Amino acid sequence: MVTRNVNSFINELDSKMATIDKIMTEKKKYAECNNTLPKELPNITKEEAIKAYKLLVRKFGRKQTRHPWKDKWMNRKMSVQRFEDNPRKCWVCLSGNPNGLHRGWRRLIHDVSHMVHRWLRPKAPHHCYQQADLELEMIKFVLEKGWLNGVLKTKVVILSKEEKRQVKLSHYQKLIIKWQRKQKLATTFIRKYNKRVKYLNSK
């Protein structure tokens, strides 16, 4: 009886230690996520939010599943239709404090990591080691690609007056060449059809 109670106590203690270890590991991973992003973050536009959402989903939203009736595996991609044109309002931050967890880059990466995690592992808890690890991977990917430096913004090229004139001149020259080709083609067909008309009229 004593041995049984001791074994039961040890098993219960092992279970509690495993649970505590799991919780601590998750906390460390989430802390790493929060510390990996810079403390000072830039503002983020609607255009950047849409592009970042699509690229993150396409990069990380991939998995292999069994074919429904064939004996093989197939690759599946997560859809980006949900926020393809209109991102969540909390992702866009044009003014105010962009460094908090409730808006801007931090919120976008956090939300998208949860979306992809739920798609990859529908039966897993929303907050777990795998989700935290996925969020950290996304953060590192964003930093590596330089998105915080404005890479996703459309580059606006300001041309001088002379450069604008040269662009228009080049465009019109291309149009002239295009229509000259069409003119030659039209002349060829007119000559061809005139011969046919002449042949038919001679009969």
Image (spheres, rainbow, N blue to C red):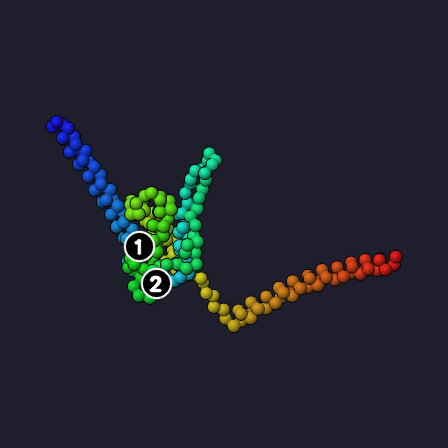
Q: Is residue 29 visible?
A: yes
Mark 1: give few (<14), some (14-19) or many (20+) Cα within 10 Å: some
Find residue 175 and report its horizontal and vertical position in percent. Answer: 63, 65
Q: Is residue 51 above or below residue 157?
A: above
- Under mark 2, the amino acid is Cys
Q: Is residue 32 left or right of residue 4?
A: right
Q: Is residue 14 above or below residue 158?
A: above
Which image quarter: residue 84? bottom left
State the CA–CA distance, disc 2 to disc 1. 16 Å
User: Which residue ends up furthest to the left in the rendered image?
Assistant: 2
Of label 2 and label 1, which has the lower sequence position?
1
Q: Secondary structure at mark 1?
A: loop
Q: Is residue 77 left or right of residue 163?
A: left
In which quadrant of the rendered image does the C terminus lie? bottom right
Find residue 56 and report its horizontal and vertical position in percent. Answer: 39, 51
Residue found 43% across the figure and 50% down from its top: 79
Residue found 32% across the figure and 43% down from its top: 124
Q: Secondary structure at mark 2?
A: loop
Observer-side mark, 2 or 1, equals 2
Residue found 44% across the figure and 53% down from its top: 81
User: Which residue ends up furthest to the bottom in the rendered image?
Assistant: 161
Foreground residue among 76 and 58: 76
In which quadrant of the rendered image does the N terminus lie? top left
Q: Which residue position is annotated with label 1?
A: 37
- Under mark 1, the amino acid is Leu
Which image quarter: residue 37? bottom left
Q: Which residue position is annotated with label 2?
A: 93
Mark 2: give few (<14), some (14-19) or many (20+) Cα within 10 Å: some
Q: Is residue 90 above or below residue 134?
A: below
